[in-house]
Image: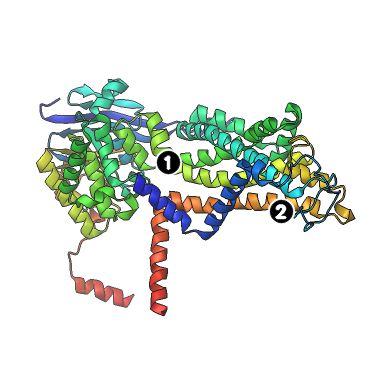
Amino acid sequence: MKEDTLIEVQGLQKVYSGKRSLFTPSKKVTAVKDVSFSIRKGETFGLIGESGSGKTTVGRMILRLIEPTNGSIIYNGQSLRDLSNKEMTSLRKEIQIVFQDSGSAFNPRKTIGAQIAHPLKKFGENQDPQFIHQQVLKMLEVVGLRADFFHRYPHELSGGQRQRAGIARALILKPKFLVLDEPVAALDVSVKAQIINLLIDLQKEFQLTYLFIAHNLDLVAYFCNRVAVLSKGEVIETSSTIDLFNNPKHEMTKKLLSSILTLEGDLGEVYKKRSVI
Amino acid sequence: MTTKWKQSCKAFLSDKMATTGAIVILFSLILAVFASWIAPYNPNVVAEGSTRLMPPGTEGHILGTDQQGRDILSRVIFGTQTSLISAVIPVIIAAIISVVLGVIAGYYQGFIGNLIMRTMDIFFAFPAVLLAIAIAAILGPGLLNVIIAMVIVRIPYMTRVVYTDTLQESQKEYVEAAKAFGIGDIEIMFKQILPNVLPSLIVYSTTLAGVTIVTVAGLSFIGLGVQPPTADWGRMASDGKKVLMQGYAFVTFIPGIAILILSFSFSMIGDGLRNALDPYERSKAKEKKKISRKTSQHIA
C-alpha cells in the first residue's frame, strides 16, 4: 500500500442469497462480483456504472451499511471488516455519506437543525448545548444555508437546499472521507452545478477525499481525478479522467461516453431535423 | 417542543368534526367520572313511585324506565363508565404491545420478523368477534376478562399496521444515515422510526376504540360481559329485546344510540389527530386555510 492511499478496496464481493422457499432452491444474486480500487488522499475518485451495476452497493459496503460477502477494505491501514462494532462506531466519524434522495435522507418528523446536531449530541466531545447549536449554525453557513433553516422541517426545503443540509450533516463530525452516492442525480441542472461547486470548495476547505458515485459521465470530467467504470458488478476500466475521455479502452466506457448530452455541433441542424419530424 | 404542541392543538381544533368528537368524548368522560353525582337515581334500584316501562318524557324519568322500573337515564350515565373503560384500556394496552412487536418485526425482518408475524397470522385465522367470544367464554364473564379478551383480539391488527409502516420506513435513507453515524438499533427503532409510525397507529387506535365499544356491547348482549345488575349499554339493549316488539322499543334504542354516538365520536377524532400530528399535513392544512381565506377575500 502506497503512502498516500487513504482507502483500498480489494476483491469486494456481495452475493444475496435471494428468496428461499420450500420447493425451489435459493437463487443467488451477485450484486458485486469483483471490485478493487484504491483512492488517494485528497482526490475525487469516480465510480461510474449503469443502474444495477452495483456501484451503490460498493458505496454502502465501504460504510459497512451492507456486509460484504468477500474482499477487504483497508482504510488508513486498518481493515474495516476486522474491526469490532465498537471500533467501527468510533471510525464512523471519519467516513460519511451523502445520499441521492435528499427527500428520504431526512426524518420527516424532526427539524433540520436537530438532525444535523444529532451526531454531535451522540458522539461529539463537547456536549454543551450552546456549543452544539453554534456548530450546527456554522455548518449551515458553510454549506450556504441561512440560520433560520435550523428550525425548519425537511419538507419545507427545496431539493437543492435539502442536499446542502445533507452535506452539512455528513460534515458535522469533521470526516476525512465522504461517499457521495449520486448526490446531484435528483437535482435540476443549475442546482447540480451549485452543489458540485460547493463540494469542490468544501474539499479544499476540509481536505476531504471523495468517492463520487454516478450513473453517467457528464460531471465526472469536471469533478473527478480518477475514474473506475463498473459493469455488472466488475470494474472494467480504471484510469485518470483525462485518459478515460481521450482513450477509452472498453466498449462499455465508449458507450457511456457517447451518451453524454452536450450542446456541441450545429444547433441549426438539430432544429432542421426536428422540423422534418 | 411547546410550539410544536401549540401547532398540533391548533390544527386539531380547526377540524370541526374532530373537535365535535373530542367534545362528546370529554363530555362522556365527565359523565363517567361524576356519575354518582349527575345521575338522578340509583341505577340498579327501582326508585320509589316509579312503575315498569314508563315511556320517555315521563315526569322524573326523562328517558323512561326499563322493564324492572329502573331509571334509564341513570343507567345510561353509569353505563358510560364500563363503555369507556372497555374501549380505551384494551386499545391502549394492545397498542403498546403492538408497537414493540411490530417495530421489532419490521426492523429486523428475517427470522424474528417471521416468528412474530406468523404468530399473528394464527390469530388472524379467527374472526375477531368469534375469538373474543371464545376467550371471554374460557375466562368467564366479567369486565376484567372482557378487557383481556379485547387486548388479545386487537394485537394482531395493530401489529400488522405497525409492521407494514416500519417495513417501509426502515428502507428510507434517514435510517441508513443514522446507521452511518453508528447510532444503535434500539435508538433507530424507537426514536427515528417510531415517530413516523405512531400517527397511523393512533388514527387506527381511535377507530378501533369505536369498534371495541360495539364489540364489548355485543359480548354483554350475549351475556359474556359485565354482570347484572351493573349498568352496561350492551346488557341494557339485551334486556330490552324481550319487550322490543311490544311497543317498548326505547328500552333497547336508547342504549343503542349511546353506543352509536360514542363509537362514532372515536372514529371522528381519528382523522383530526392524524392531521394534527403530521408536520407535513399540518402545513398543508395551513396552506389550504390561507388559500380559502384569500379566495373568500377575493369574493368579498
Q: Earlier in the sequence, mark 2 or mark 1?
A: 1
Q: Which residue is mark 1?
A: B195
The answer to whether any part of residue B135 appears in the image is: yes
Where in the figure is residue B241, as x and y percent of width and height?
Answer: 84, 48
Image quadrant for the N terminus of chain A? top left
The reply, left or right, for residue B45 in relation to residue A262 is: right
- What number is the disc on residue B257? 2
Q: Are marks 2 and 1 on the same chain?
A: yes
Where in the figure is residue A36, as x and y percent of width and height?
Answer: 24, 32
* Residue placed most toward the observer, A196 or A205: A205
Question: In the image, what residue occupies the spot 87% across and 57% down?
Answer: B247
Q: Chain of mark 2?
A: B
Instruction: Say if mark 2 contacts mark 1, CB within 8 Å.
Output: no
Label 1 environment density (alpha carbons within 10 Å; few <14, some 14–19, many ≥20) = some
* Residue placed most toward the observer, A166 or A274: A166
* Residue placed most toward the observer, A239 or B125: B125
Secondary structure at badge 2 equals helix
Secondary structure at badge 1 equals helix
The kind of residue tagged 2 is Ile
Q: Chain of mark 1?
A: B
Question: In the image, what residue occupies the spot 78% across and 36% down?
Answer: B228
The answer to whether any part of residue A227 appears in the image is: no
Image quadrant for the C terminus of chain A? bottom left
The kind of residue tagged 1 is Pro
Where in the figure is residue A6, as x and y percent of width and height?
Answer: 16, 30
Q: CA distance from mark 2 to mark 1?
A: 36 Å
Direction right: furthest residue: B246
Where in the figure is residue A81, as x and y percent of width and height?
Answer: 29, 23
